[in-house]
Each structure stands twice: as structure tokens, then as C-alpha cells.
Image: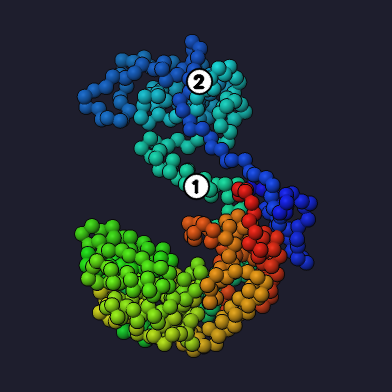
């Protein structure tokens, strides 16, 4: 990764002259030109191994008499020492029975033990238990780094270790039976550690307040990655409803819906079913659980699950969970994204009697809508059941915000429809609606429903308040969202950005390079605009992007500021031209 402030051009390093807007800050972590550097590879501290020692009085693992093993000893356990073995000597200044702390000196290989309350100069020989634990043949032994070959004894550093010992905190002492999970985690997190070291890690940044206009690390931020599409999360009526529910029902119900269903749950389910034009509705704790539970409720050995190959993770995971049950594992097939011909070909060649087709209304990473009318016609022709995830369409599509089925005039044509409260409805929770028997079947079969805590009533009442707003002024709210999305999309296309296939309020600003996406994110963040990058494995390599979500809550000033910054940094990082940044690393 380049050092902060490095600039580069197509032909190599150039003068450090950042491109800035009036009043805009220069991004401290990166600027706009082509780097001619390459970051040094990230190195790892060596794995601690047992130390060696020298000297007639040095206490080492080899100086301890190996205890005898009995036939009753369990394999792999530290055995009880031979009681006939001499007790270790104690040095002057030690106090018998006093709690000790042990530390190995790498220079001398000496194990010294300090009293918990003694001065640094006071020390003692380790106890018999510590002696056995430090032995190289003990399965629970801590591994310490070896002394370099030919190294002369050296004095102990200020931190208590000899030269050559890894600097920083002591290595984590991991029992052998857990070592493989730590090795796997350490290896797979290498890329993340590198991004953090280079200060371009873009995720899990803590907000200091809610809403589109928030602060991060004390800096004001306009959030363009929020899913609060109608901007109702912070509405005073919504917050007041949640507060009243806390007073009546407390913050949670501490049990599953089996024995923790309230009047509030039932009333909201009935209102949602009526609003969506369905017979019944069921509330889950999350939208993710709603999809997983629905798939698991219907998939069996006579079923083929057919997925769009850009389906959301909840669809994939529900499918994989179903497929991982040997006694009732369904067949799993994929069709090309939004390709009716590919779907029809899969339906013709499926190996099982029944078929469940799983798609999204709006695909959250590309912002394009499903060709829902054609897909429904194919499903009906081949007697396949359609399961629609309309999480991003609920509240944003259709005259009243009822989703893609309302927009296309297809209400009632999809047997299974799933959505969420975590976007338009501003909280958390999942929704399933359809025929009463179908919904009741899921209610009694979905493990993600039966074995998960009941949706907290404050969330239920907040969602009920937003539903009232949609019932009363839904067309005006949806229309305002569409006007702002149309304005922002038009300006992005005018500047020259590639928005892929997006035709909704979700717009991928295509960077097609991980480094460009990360650099753009950091530059925008340092000027008060948050647009989260989507990189591999979220998308294929070479399809990296910034995902922009326009909401009703964004003002014209918010959008104009973001557009001006995007234009400046899009040109500076060659996103507009599509030029390669050249061989480099983060």
C-alpha cells in the first residue's frame, strides 16, 4: 500500500498536488495519481517454539526428571509427577506458598518465576507444576521461540525478553487441540490485516448516532449506504411508538414465538396480510431467517431447488442447509442471472418431481430488477413454485410501495413472498406472506422460526407505525424516492460512471478494481461521504464497486456534494477512464 499522500501518474511518480474541491479535505490515506511503489510484504511473527538453555544452574525442561506413567493415565494428558522426584529448589527471596508468575528468558533459556507481589529483582524457581508444563514433551506445553543458532547470551530487554524475541505482546498461548482453527483464521485474515495496516479497511466503522446524517470518529458523515429507503427510521412517531412498547412489554420477550406471541404480533401480521393482498402473514426475527426457514420447510428429496446465480446469501444458505440433510436432500440447480431461457432449460432437465424457483425482486449488489413477469409465466408453464425475496422492493416499488408484484400488476401470482423490516420499515425482522395453509405450514415447520427468540415488541410497534404511514401517504413517499433516484442516476451517467444494469435506487458505481474501490471509499469518507465498497468475495474479481443507495432522506445538497466528490476522485483514480493502476498492492 502506498504511504499516505503518495501521488502517481501514468508515467510514474509526480508532484504531490492533490485535487480538491472548495472546502474539501485531502484524503490522508491516498491521492490521485499512479504509484511507482510496492508495499513490503506483511510478515508474521515466528511460531513460538521451546527455548534451549545452557549453564550449569539454568533451569530447563530437560533438567526436570520425567514422571512415571501408569496404565490408568489417559493418552495426551499431563501425568501426575513421581512423588519421589526432588522438589525444585527455591531461590533466596521467594516465599513458600506465594502465588507465582512464570516467564522464560530467551537469552539464557532460564525459566524464572516472580512473585505476584514481589519486586522485579525477586525471583524463585518454578513450582513442580510449572516445571512439568514447560516440558517439551507435555501436550499442554507453551511453545517458546528458539534461540538463533550461534547466538551469544544477551541481556534481557526492557520488556523482559531477550533480543530476538518477537516484539509486542506475548504470543497467545493456544492449547494444541485448538491450534488448527487459529492457523486457519490467521491465514484467511491476512488480506484484512493488510488493509487495516494500510488504513483502507472499510467495514464495521461504528456510528456515533443513527440516521443518514451521522458521525464516525467525531467527523460528520452523510451515509449513502443506508437501506432506510423512505427515511422513516428516525421519524418522531416511529420512535415514540417504540418507547411506549418498551414501557408495556419491556425490551424483549426472552423466548420463541411458540410461547411468546403477543397481541401486537398478531395484529401486525393481520394488517400486513391485508396490505399485501394475501390470506396470511408470518413475522420472523430477521429476514434472513424467514428465507432459510421457508426453504427448509418445503425442500425434500422429491424437490429441485432452482436459484438465480446472483441470489442473496440467505437464499444460498437456506438451500445449502436443505441440501446438507441426507435423508431429504433436494436437487440444487442454478440458472443464469435473469435469463428466462436458462431457467426454462433447467426446468426441462431437472431430476426431481417438484421445483421451487428462488429469485429476488431487486438484486442488492447490481440494483437491477427481476424479469418477474416472464419468470412467473415460465414457472406456471412447468408447474414450478416461485419464492420471491422482495426485501429491497418493499416500500420502494409499486404505487403504494407494495413491491415489484404491485409494480408489474402481478399481485397474488407468487405463492411465496418474503421481505424484511430492516430496510423500508427501519428496524429488524422478516415477513412471509401467502395462502393461509402455506404460511401455517411454515409456522409449524421452520426451525428458524420455532427455535429463535420472538421479535421484540418495540420493533413490532415501530413497524406498525411505518405501515400506517404507507397506508396513508405511500404514493407520495415512493414518488419522492423515485425523483431523487432519477436525479442522482442521471448525473452519474452524465459524469461518465458505469452503473451496470441498475434501474432502481440502488446504483453500483463500477470500479472494476479492488484498489480503486478502496481508494475511492477512503477519499470520500475523509470528505464526509460514506459509500461502502463491495469487493471479492461479495462480487467477482474485476467487478468491484461502490454501492450507492439513494433514499428519500437525502437532500439535494447531500447528493450534489457526493456527485462533486465522485467526479473528482473518479477522474483521479482512473475510474472514469477505466485505466489500469498498474502492478501494485494495497
Mark 1 or 2: the one toward you: 1
Category of crowding for the residue at label 1, using alpha-carbon neighbours closer than 10 angstroms: few (below 14), some (14–19), many (at least 20): few
Q: Nearer the viewer, residue 514 or 58?
A: 514
Q: Nearer the viewer, residue 314 or 457?
A: 314
Q: Tell me which label, 1 or 2, sits earlier in the chain.
A: 2
Q: Is residue 241 above or below residue 10?
A: below
For label 2, the SS is: loop
Q: Nearer the viewer, residue 114 or 189?
A: 189
Q: Nearer the viewer, residue 378 or 122?
A: 378
Q: Find disc 2 in the rendering and name its residue.
A: 109
Residue 67 in view (yes/no): yes
Spatial CA distance of label 1 from label 2 is 33 Å
Q: Is residue 467 left or right of residue 21?
A: left
Q: What color scheme is it?
A: rainbow
Residue 330: give x, y in percent of width and height.
Answer: 26, 64
Q: Is residue 38 left or right of residue 297?
A: right
Residue 78: give x, y in percent of width and height.
Answer: 33, 28
Residue 493: give x, y in percent of width and height.
Answer: 63, 74
Which residue, as the protein is rendered here, is positioned at the far top? Answer: 56
Q: Residue at x 43, y 66 (%)?
A: 310
Which circle marks residue 189 in the picture?
1
Residue 217 in view (yes/no): no
Which circle marks residue 7 in the picture?
none
Q: Is residue 181 above or below residue 109?
A: below
Amino acid at each position: 500500500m502506498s504511504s499516505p499522500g503518495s501521488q502517481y501518474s501514468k508515467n510514474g511518480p509526480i508532484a504531490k498536488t492533490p485535487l480538491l474541491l472548495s472546502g474539501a479535505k485531502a484524503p490522508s490515506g491516498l491521492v490521485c495519481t499512479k504509484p511507482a511503489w510496492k508495499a513490503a510484504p506483511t510478515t508474521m511473527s515466528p511460531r513460538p517454539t521451546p527455548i534451549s538453555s545452557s549453564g550449569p544452574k539454568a533451569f530447563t525442561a530437560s533438567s526436570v526428571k520425567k514422571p512415571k506413567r501408569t496404565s490408568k493415565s489417559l493418552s495426551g494428558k499431563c501425568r501426575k509427577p513421581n512423588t519421589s522426584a526432588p522438589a525444585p529448589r527455591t531461590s533466596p527471596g521467594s516465599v513458600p506458598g506465594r502465588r507465582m508468575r512464570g516467564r522464560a528468558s530467551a537469552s539464557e533459556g532460564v525459566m524464572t518465576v516472580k512473585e505476584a507481589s514481589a519486586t522485579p529483582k525477586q525471583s524463585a524457581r518454578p513450582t513442580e507444576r510449572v516445571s512439568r508444563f514447560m516440558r517439551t514433551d507435555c501436550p499442554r506445553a507453551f511453545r517458546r521461540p528458539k534461540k538463533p543458532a550461534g547466538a551469544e547470551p544477551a541481556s534481557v530487554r526492557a520488556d523482559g525478553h531477550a533480543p530476538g524475541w518477537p516484539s509486542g505482546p506475548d504470543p497467545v498461548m493456544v492449547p494444541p487441540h485448538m491450534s488448527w482453527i487459529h492457523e486457519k483464521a490467521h491465514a484467511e485474515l491476512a488480506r484484512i490485516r493488510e488493509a487495516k495496516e494500510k488504513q483502507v479497511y472499510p467495514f464495521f466503522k461504528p456510528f456515533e448516532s443513527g440516521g443518514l446524517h451521522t458521525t464516525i470518529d467525531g467527523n460528520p458523515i452523510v451515509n449513502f449506504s443506508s437501506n432506510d429507503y423512505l427515511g422513516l427510521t428516525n421519524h418522531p412517531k416511529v420512535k415514540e411508538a417504540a418507547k411506549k412498547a418498551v414501557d408495556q412489554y419491556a425490551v424483549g420477550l426472552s423466548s420463541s414465538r411458540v410461547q411468546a406471541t403477543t397481541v401486537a404480533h398478531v395484529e401486525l401480521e393481520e394488517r400486513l396480510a391485508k396490505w399485501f393482498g394475501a390470506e396470511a402473514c408470518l413475522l420472523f426475527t430477521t429476514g434472513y431467517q424467514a428465507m432459510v426457514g421457508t426453504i427448509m420447510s418445503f425442500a425434500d428429496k422429491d424437490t429441485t431447488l432452482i436459484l438465480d446465480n446472483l441470489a442473496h446469501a440467505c437464499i444460498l444458505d437456506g438451500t445449502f442447509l436443505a441440501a446438507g440433510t441426507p435423508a431429504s436432500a433436494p436437487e440444487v440447480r442454478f440458472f443464469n442471472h435473469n435469463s428466462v431461457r436458462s431457467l426454462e432449460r433447467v426446468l426441462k432437465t431437472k431430476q426431481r418431481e417438484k421445483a421451487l424457483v428462488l429469485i429476488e425482486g431487486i438484486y442488492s449488489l447490481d440494483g437491477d430488477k427481476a424479469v418477474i413477469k416472464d419468470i412467473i409465466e415460465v414457472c406456471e408453464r412447468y408447474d414450478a413454485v416461485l419464492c420471491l425475496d422482495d426485501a429491497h422492493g418493499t416500500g420502494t416499488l409499486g404505487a403504494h410501495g407494495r413491491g415489484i408484484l404491485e409494480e408489474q400488476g402481478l399481485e397474488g401470482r407468487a405463492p411465496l413472498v418474503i421481505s424484511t423490516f430492516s430496510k423500508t420499515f427501519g428496524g429488524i425482522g422478516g415477513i412471509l406472506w401467502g395462502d393461509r395453509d402455506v404460511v401455517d405450514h411454515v409456522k409449524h415447520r421452520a426451525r428458524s422460526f420455532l427455535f429463535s427468540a420472538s421479535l421484540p415488541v418495540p420493533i413490532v410497534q415501530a413497524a406498525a407505525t411505518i405501515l400506517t404511514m404507507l397506508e396513508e401517504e405511500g404514493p407520495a413517499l415512493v414518488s419522492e424516492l423515485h425523483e431523487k433516484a432519477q436525479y442522482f442516476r442521471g448525473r452519474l451517467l452524465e459524469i461518465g460512471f458505469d452503473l451496470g444494469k441498475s434501474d432502481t435506487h440502488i446504483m453500483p458505481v463500477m470500479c472494476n478494481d479492488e484498489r480503486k474501490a478502496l481508494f475511492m471509499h477512503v477519499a470520500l469518507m475523509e470528505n464526509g461521504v460514506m459509500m461502502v465498497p463491495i469487493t471479492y468475495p461479495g462480487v467477482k474479481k474485476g467487478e468491484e464497486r461502490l454501492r450507492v443507495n439513494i433514499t428519500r432522506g437525502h437532500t439535494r445538497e447531500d447528493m450534489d456534494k457526493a456527485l462533486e466528490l465522485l467526479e473528482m476522485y473518479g477522474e483521479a483514480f482512473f475510474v472514469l477512464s477505466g485505466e489500469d493502476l498498474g502492478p501494485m498492492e494495497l
